[in-house]
Every structure is written in C-alpha cells, then in structure tokens.
Image (spheres, coloured by chain):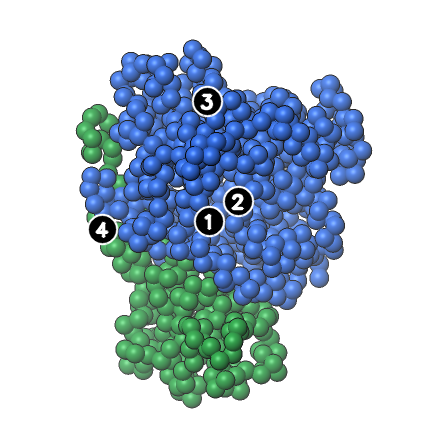
Chain colours: A blue, B green
Amino acid sequence: MTATTSNLLEIDLSARKSQVVDITADVQTFLGGRGLGAKLVWDRVPAGTDPLGPDNTLYFGIGPITGFNGAVTTISALSPLTLLYGFSCVNGHFGIEMIYAGYNAGILLTGKADSPVYLYIDDDKVEIRDASDLWGMLNLEAQQQLRNRLTNGLQNQNLAIATIGPAGEHQVRNADICHDFYHHAARLGMGAVMGSKNVKAIVVRGTKQPKYANATKLAELLIAYFQQNRLYKAQMRRWGHSYTMPTRYYASKEGVKNKMLGWHDMCDLSNPVLHEQRYKLWNDSCALCQVGCKTPYMRREPPLGPCAGEIRHDNAGGWNANVLIPGYETQIYLTPLVDNLGLDSEDVSGVVAWMMECYERGIVSRDDLDGIDLTWGNLEAICKLLRKIAYREGIGDILAEGLKFAPAKIGKGSEAYAMTHKGVAITSYELRGALADAISLAMVPVGELHGLGKGRGDPFRVLADSLTVCAFLRPSLNSVFGFSTWGAEMLNAVCGWHLTEEDVNTIAHRLAMIERCVCLREGHVPTQDDTVPDRFFDEVIYTKYGKPLKLDRDDFRKEREKFYLSIGLNKDGIPPKEYLEKLELEFVMPTLEMMGLKLAP
Amino acid sequence: MVKNQQSEVSQKKRGYGAKVVAQQPKFPEDRWGVEHLPYPQGVAYIQARWDLCIGCGACEMVCSLSHFGVINRELSRIRIYRYLTPIPKSVQNVCSQCREEERECQKACPVDPPAIYYDDKEFHMTVDMDRCLGHRCAKCQDACPANVPTFYAPEHDCALVCDLCYDSEGGRRPQCVEICPSYCLEFLKPEFPQHLDRVHPDEKAESFSRKLYPLPKDKVQRAPEEIWGGEK
C-alpha cells in the first residue's frame, strides 16, 4: 500500500502556459476543496488584492476522495462580493472528470487572458482555445454549443463543462459558474472572478485510472454505504430538495416579503406534493451518489410554459414568498431564467427583494428603476430587472454591485432594508424562528451560506466541504459510520495514510481556522461583522398561528461568545497563539500580529 | 433461496474486489420488492428502465470491481452516458445478449471463428481475450447498433461485453443489478426480441428530448419579451 501523490494543474492565463505541480504536502495538511482553497489564497493572493483583478486566483478544488464518495467541486478565490475569502460548491460530474483526468488536487487558474478563451482539458492535453464566438451566450446555449463541437461519438460523451453566463462576463459581483445547466457554483461571485479572467468555459474529460491506495478497503466502504443507505433516499428522491420548504414556512424559518412578515397566504402555494404530481420529469444524481435528489420539472401550460427547470430550497427559497411570487408554478419559469443569465439565484433574489421594499417605501421611484414598476410579486418587472442586472444596464449597473456596495450608492436610508450578512444577501432564511439558526448563520466567516442547523462555519461542515462530500450526504454518513471515523477510513483507503479519528478532528479545526485567518487578513472584524441585520432584533413577526418572534441582542451576544469559545477562539473571535500552534498554523501569526490583532487566549 | 447461489470460493476464484449482497428483508418471510425477484434461468439479460437511471455510476463502479478488482468506470461493461436534452439526463448502455439472427458483433468479427461469440451453454456473450484484435479493429463495436462493446486500450485492450457476472459454478448474479440504487436495472428473461431493447444511447436521449417537446435543445423557456412584449 503506497501513498498516492496529489497533482495540481496550474494554468497561467497571462502567459498561456500550464504545469502540473505536486502538492502532496499541502493536501496532507489541508485535504482539498474549501480548506486547501483557503491555503492557496493565503499563499498566492496578497492581502487587499482586487478580487476582479489579474492577481486573484481561481481554484477548482477537489479533495482526495472525490470521485469515490463525494462529487463536490469547491471553487474558491477572493470574493468580489464580500472582499473576504470566497468559495462555492458545485455538485454534478465535474469533480469526477478531474479525478479521471489525473488532477486529483484540482485546477488553479492564475493571471488573466487577453481575449475570451475556454480551456479544454483532455487527460494530459491542456489547451487554451479561443472563445470569442461563445462570449455573450447564455449558459445552456454555450454548453450545448461546446457539446456539439467537442463530442465525437460516445467516446467523449461524458465531458464535463463549466461555463459562465452574461452576468459573469459583465463581472456582476454575484455571478455564478454553471455546470450541466442546473448545477451551480453560485455563491460569493465566483463567476465574476472567472469572467474577470476572460475564461468563458472549462471543459474536462478524463479516461485515466484514478489513484487510490487500497482497493479492497475502499470497495468495502463504498458498498457498505450504498447498501445501508438505500432508505435515506426516499424523501429527497421523491420531491427533490424543495420538500423542506413548507415545514420551514410553517415554523417561520423562511423569509417572507423581505423578512417583514412571518407568514403570508402565498406560503401555502409552495407545495411539493402538487408540484411533484403535476410537473416532475425524472430524477438525476451526481457522480456516485445513490440519492438522486435532482428532480427537474416541466410546465407546459401557458402563459409561462413551456418551460423546464430544477427547483430546490436554495433557488426557490429566496424567490417565492420573499418577493411574493405565487409558488413553485411560477418558479419553474423564473429559475431557468436566472440560471441562464448566470446570476446567483439566491443572492440576486435578496437584491430584488430589497429594491422592492425601497420602491414600496418611495426611496426609489419608477424613474430611478428605468420605468420598471417593481411592485411585490410582479414577475414581468422582476424578469426585466434581472436582465438589466446581468448586462449592467441602467439601474442594473448599481444593483450588480451586490448588497455590500449597492446600498451605499442608493443611499436615502435604504441601507436599513438590505438584508445582508457581510455583503451576502440573507434570502431564504428567517432567523427569528430560532436563535440557534441566527448564530450558525452569523458565524460563517465568509458570509451567509445556507446557515441552518450545523451552519457552514462549523468545523465539520468545513471538513465535509474539503473532503468534497455533499452536505446532504453528511447526516447519513454520520449515522452509518460516524463522520470522522468514515473520513479517516476513507482517507486511509484512498491516500494510504494512517490517520485516526482524532487526526481528522484536528484537521477539521485546522481547515475552519485557516479560512478564518484569511478573512481576518482581509479585514474581517468578528465582533462587528458576525451579526445579523437590525430588523431581526427590532421588528416582531408573527407565525401563521399568531406566535410573536423576535431576537434578543444580549442573548445573541452571549451565544456568539459561547460559539467562539467552542471552536477554540477567544471571546472576541480571534484565534489564540497557542491554539494556532496546536493546529500547526504558525505561518499565519506574523501577518495577523502585524495587523495589530492580539492573539491572546 | 433457489436463485443466484454463489459460493464464497467461486467469488475468490474470480478475484472479486468485494461482494455485493442484496439487502436482507426485515422479516424473512416478506420477500417482496424488486430486489427479491427470483433470477431467471436460461436465456436472460440486463434490462434497463431508461427513465429511472439517475446516472450515479454505481453500476460502473461494481462492474469494474467485480471483473478487474479496480475502480475504473472505463473498464466497466455497462456504461453511463450523459446528455443535455436540454435537461441533463443519463442513459445506460449494456449488452442485451441478442438472439443469433441479430447478433451483429459476432457476424462482424474478422477472426475465424469469431473472438466475440455467444456461449450457448451458459447463455452469455464471451470474448476470447487471446484472439481479440483490440481497439484498432473494433469491428464489433461498429457493427453493434447500440455501440455496446468498448475497449480500454491502456489496460485491457479487448472488447468489453456483459457476461452477466457468470462464474464456472453456475452462479449468475449481475452485480450492477444488485447495487443499482434506483432499481433501474433488472435481470429478466426476454419478453420480446432483445434487439428491440438494444437502442443506441443517442436515440435513448432523443426520446427524452421528445418528452420535453416543444422545447428545443438549447432553450428551456420562452424569453420574457415573447410573453410580455417589449424590447429585448
């Protein structure tokens, strides 16, 4: 049993050169995906770099076990939306193609191409090709074009394509990267970074033998998981991920009318049962996932039909009742529109909801909005505004800056109505439903990212993102094997290491910490920034059954301190020196100390 | 337990990487459900319900594991292909053990007697590894209307076709059928001539495109301007 090596494909777009780098040592300490992405940003991107400039890097990260159990590709860079560390996860079949192409530590893009290009990677062949004819195309159109051009019989039918839409090309700060039409690396503006590098698409095809150390052990783990987990699929596979919405509306955990209300009759229209029976097409899964929670829908009846799309909590939650759009039936039209333009469905829904409230309160007039009558639930107005944002036309040029910069540009007190956390829109989540939710959302150092339950700031979520395991599989892995045990066994089987469960726990904390350190370096002040908008503390909402809900500032502060201490920080959210040493992160200390941070316990 | 008995010994002989076992029912007398359908004797093949395939690739994983002891989908005898119809859809492709008159691969093989042939005693296709000419010939692949036989030149340059996981002691337990999480694959005796089930993946994908009529391949909706008017 020999340890496997980790190869990173580094492509310098300015010089149009590529090389394969062995980064096994880094992978041993930071695994891959989200954690390794933070380390690469720390190493390669100087503090205070313009995220949309040529000095930023874009890392298509996978982990050692991607392609065996876990299909996530974590794309990371300095985020243009928050100016902190940014990453975004995309499932599907992109990661497994990278593994089969032999780049088991991912692909790193540096520099900037001088004209629109797309990257074609076929095993060892890496080509930077002209994409001027693809530039300007919508996501699906560009992907279909590339497929028609590059597939040649069944031999390379399975090539994986990631593209950006018009929003990414115009460097809209919340633009996304799209893979296979409905898989999106949507959050934190990774599409804008790709657009700033003039890269329209990345095409990967791999046919090599993937590397692993111990076939028997690996097969045992994979097959045990497939067998024991058959039952877990039931809910997810039947209704898709949107099945969580009604429960959440009834608990007032889902935003209604830009967080002004706790319940609206429209919430009942988000009905997964009717939706499944009327519109569902089939199930689709990501690589080596037995759940298959992707459930595409098609609506045939006019006026909106025929249209087809994939609806899940993430892209439906921000739109439905948050902007008073009547349920999933209308969502089937809206979702593919946003997807095709290449906008982050979640973030842009927050921007639109904010604009709607400003319009209702008279802060912006119809003239300011270029004649768009942006009343609540006006689908036509939303579609027009989205187009303006994606192409940065008129008012869209301001709104494309995202909720960190746009409120200041609009002014007139509009800042108070921007529901944002570190610049990322809080869209689907209503935090007054539970204090724990508010805490786990506020504690994510990079900004709001699906913060409920064990939020994305939790070290074990960071571990899952770095191992590149889907967030939906984590609970079931936990119940079958125990997550750390499984992580250790899987890493040992694939990489030939000798990790124990303890080691994996240490790694989890190290990964969470390096991400925090990058954010601290970029100017994140925990006690100031780890909070939620005032509306959640000051305004009362009522659930459907009339129960009042509000957050309390003192409780929030106390819980926040508890959280900081629980993950090894001091009560101001700064990592103590001893803890950094324990996690072998000594190299961050000089930089942080130079910034005047007191690394005291 | 009439069906599919396969001893531990025979599995070891075949070099199985791991053993897949059908899920045990909670109460042994309740042997209902797709996974407890008795396996057929005699002529049979792996049938797929196209719409149920979720494209996870578990079948590819166990196929390469059981035949070669490695995880490599390129070495699998059942293959998954992905299409944008425009909604992404995966379709699978596996040998349908055609009847003699329709067995195009065997007819096309330039070697005499054919290196790819139907084993009449054991009821499955076989490839004679010593005599197969490999990917440079690939006449069987071209002749098969569904493009089923594949080659993986770097490690096993010889046609790969489904042998129903047959072992010399008479056990037939197709591993892909046993692991398929969506019950898309079924191991049944032919209910109609097999070649009707032998459809090229492109054509399977085309049928899903038709389900999405009238959407074209690169659009999933009408533009907002077409619905509400106004400038583009």
| Chain to which the residue tagged by mark 2 belongs | A
Residue at 67%, 52% (x, y): give it. A484
The residue drawn where x is 40% and y is 18% is A398
Residue indicated by mark 4: B213
Circle 4 chain: B
The residue labelled by disc 1 is A92
Q: Secondary structure at mark 2?
A: strand
Do discs 4 and 2 share a chain?
no
Label 3 in the same subunit as label 2: yes
Is the residue marked by circle 4 packed among few (<14), some (14-19), or many (20+) residues within 10 Å? few
Report which residue position mark 3 lands on: A418
Residue contact at pointers 1 and 2, CB within 8 angstroms: yes
SS for callout 4 = loop
Identified by mark 2, the residue type is: Thr
Q: Examine the rendering and report whether any part of residue A427 can be seen.
A: no
- Judge if badges 3 and 1 mark residues of a common chain: yes
